[in-house]
Image (cartoon, rainbow, N blue to C red):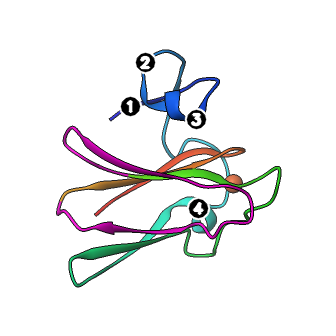
Amino acid sequence: MKFYKSTGVLESLFENGELINENSVDASLEKHVPFCEIKDNKVYVTIGEVVHPMEENHYIEWIAMVKGNKIVKYLLKPNDEPKVIFDYEKGSIIYAYCNKHGLWKKEI
Ligand SMILES: [Fe+2]
């Protein structure tokens, strides 16, 4: 799936803005690549292995799970924990978007 940057967070899924490339920014991998634990048919996702900051001007805006044409997306705010739980589907991709360091992904 391709993500596009636009003025509104919700519009980031549609092809009306600048294409965002994954894992392309020179930033800490440990703080951005989704860290995923699969247990009892759930995926427990934390961004990242070293938890990403959730400050006013630097935070994870959203975390999404994509499988085929299905997407489940959680929007986050500063001071939220960068953690979500999805129903596990084999072959899914977890995406995270940092407002400073762009798009990151992990296949599960
Ligand atoms: Fe970041």
Inspect the magenta stretch and tell me whether residue 76 lies in it.
yes
- Dot 4 surroundings within 10 Å: few (below 14), some, or many (20 or more)? some
Q: Is residue 41 above or below residue 25?
A: below
Question: Which corner quadrant of the image does residue 31 belong to?
Answer: bottom right
Earlier-in-chain disc, 1 versus 2: 1
In this picture, residue 74 sits left or right of residue 91 = right
Image marks 1 and 2: residues in contact by CB distance under 8 Å = yes
Q: Is residue 20 visible?
A: no
Residue 55 % position (x, y): 80, 60
In this picture, residue 74 sits left or right of residue 31 = left
Measure the alpha-carbon separation of dots 1 and 4. 20 Å
In this picture, residue 63 sits left or right of residue 56 = left
- Camera-near label (2 vs 3) is 3
Q: Is mark 4 within 8 Å of ligand 1?
A: no
Image marks 2 and 4: residues in contact by CB distance under 8 Å = no
Earlier-in-chain disc, 3 versus 1: 1
- Using the image, tell me which numbered label, if any, was put on residue 2: 1
Measure the alpha-carbon separation of dots 3 and 1. 14 Å
- Camera-near label (3 vs 1) is 3
Ligand 1 appears in which quadrant?
A: bottom right
Type of the residue with mark 3: Val
- Dot 3 surroundings within 10 Å: few (below 14), some, or many (20 or more)? few
Earlier-in-chain disc, 2 versus 3: 3
Residue 54 % position (x, y): 73, 63
SS state under label 2: loop
- Dot 2 surroundings within 10 Å: few (below 14), some, or many (20 or more)? few
Type of the residue with mark 1: Lys
Q: Which residue is mark 4?
A: 29
Q: Is residue 31 above or below residue 102?
A: below
- Using the image, tell me which numbered label, if any, was put on residue 9: 3
